[in-house]
Image: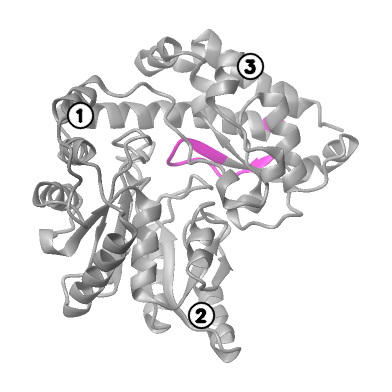
Amino acid sequence: MTEGLAGLWRRPAPEGRGPVRYGPPAPEPGLPVLPELTTVLAVAADRAAPEPPGGGQALREAACRHWARRGLATAPENVAAGPGAPALLLALLGAYGGDVMLPRPCPAWWTPQVRLLGRRAYHVPTPAECGGVPDPYALLETVRRVRAEGGDPRVLLLSVADDPTATVPPPELVREACEAAEAAGLFVVSDESWRDTVHRPHDTLVLSPAEMLPDRAAVLVDLAGALLPAGWPAAVVRFPGTPSGTWLRARTLDVLTATGALVAGPVAVAAAHALDETDAVAGRAYAAAALHGTVAAAAHRVLLAAGALARPPQAGRHLYADLTPLRAGLARHGVGDAMELEDWLGARLGTATPGGQRFADELGAPRVRLSTGPLLGATPRERLAALGARDPLTLPQVREALDRLGSVLAGLAD
C-alpha cells in the first residue's frame, strides 16, 4: 500500500486501544467532496452565526422532506439537528434517562456515549444472519435479568443498516425486535445513518422501527453516512409526534443548548441541500453505494477463498471478517485475540483494521472491520476513476489492493 494511502487511512495509536479518543473512525467514502456541495458551502461561508439549538426551520424542513420520500411523514416541530450523530445521540440519551440495551457487535462510538452519561450499557447477541438488531428472545431475557438485578433499562439502540457487520436485518427480524422492545417497555432509537448506502436498494427492503412503533421510536441519521463528508458534521433526529415525543425533543434541545452542540451555519445550508437530494447529490450517493458494494463483494470473495468467514456485505463501506478458521496461522504470528489481530493485520495492509473488541465483540474472537475506501486507490484521481469505471475491479489499484489482502490471508493457511 502506498505511503499516501497509509497516511490517509490512519490507524489508531497502539497505546490508545482503550481510550475513547483513539477509537476508530467510521468507514469513509474515499471520494472527493461532490463539487455541487462545495459550491453550496462556499456561497454560505459568510454565515458567521451557528444554527439555533436543534437546527433552523430550513434544515428541519429539508429533513422532513427526506423522511417523507422514505415513507415517514414528519413535521418540523418533531425534528432536531446537531453537529453529528454522537452529539445528537448523547443529548437524546441524556434527556431520556435510564440504561441502554445494545446489539453485540455495535458501532464503536455507541457504548462510550452511554458510559459517558454514567449509564450502563447491556449488550445482547445479534441473530446469526445479520447484525444491527438484537435477537428478540435474548433481548427479553436480558431485560428481565437486568431488572431483577436492579438495573434500569429504558432504551434499545439499534441499526437497520449496520456498522460494523455491513448487513441489513430482514424486515421480519426488525419487526420481532420491535415487538420485544415494546413488550419490555423500551423506547427505540434507530440509527439509520447507513440506510442510503445499501448496495442494491432495489433488492433490499429496509424497515424503520418508526414504521412499527410510531409512538415509541426515534430515528437518527448522520449525514456523513451517505450525503456529506465527515468533516462537515451534521445529523438529524426524528421524534414521535406525540406529547411524550414533544417532551423528549424539548429535553434534548436543553442538552444541546447546555453543551453548545450547534450546527455551523454554512454546514446547515449544505446539509439542507444534501437532504433535498438533488440529482447530483442522489446520483453520487447511489454511485458510491454501488461502487463500495462491488468492491466489498470482491473483498468478501477473497476472505472466503482464504478460509475466513464474513456475512455478505449489503450496506456501507466495510465488511466484518471473522478469522477464527485461521487461528492456527494467526498463532504462528503471535496473534491470539482481536486486539493483536488489529495491529498485525493493519500493519500488513497499511490501513486501519479495527478489531472486534472496539465494537463490543468478544476480545478472544479474531474479528476485524475492513473498510473498502482504501481499496479504491491512493489519490483523488484514482478514487474518482473507480467511481466512474464500468468495472472498478479491473483497475490496477483496486486489483493490487485486493491481491494484497488475499496474499496476507493466504499466509495464514495451514
| Residue 107 vertical position relative to residue 278 in the rendered view, above or below | below
Task: Look at the image and give the residue range highlighted in magenta.
Answer: 305-319
Nearer to the camera, 251 or 37 = 251
Question: Which residue is labeled 1 in the image?
Answer: 41
Any part of residue 75 in sight? no
**The N terminus lies in quadrant:** top right
Nearer to the camera, 144 or 1 = 1
Of all residues, the one furthest to the right in this rendering is: 332
The amino acid at mark 1 is: Leu
Residue 410 pos. (x, y %): 77, 26
Name the residue rendered at 56%, 68% in the picture. Answer: 124
Name the residue rendered at 43%, 70% in the picture. Answer: 156
Residue 261 pos. (x, y %): 31, 54
Nearer to the camera, 411 or 262 = 262
Residue 90 pos. (x, y %): 39, 62
| Residue 404 vertical position relative to residue 219 in the rendered view, above or below | above
Question: Which residue is labeled 3 in the image?
Answer: 1
Residue 108 pos. (x, y %): 54, 51
Q: Give the structural element (helix, strand or loop) at label 2.
A: helix
Name the residue rendered at 17%, 43% in the picture. Answer: 49
Which is more N-terminal, label 3 or label 2?
3
As drawn, is 345 to the left or to the right of 211? Answer: right
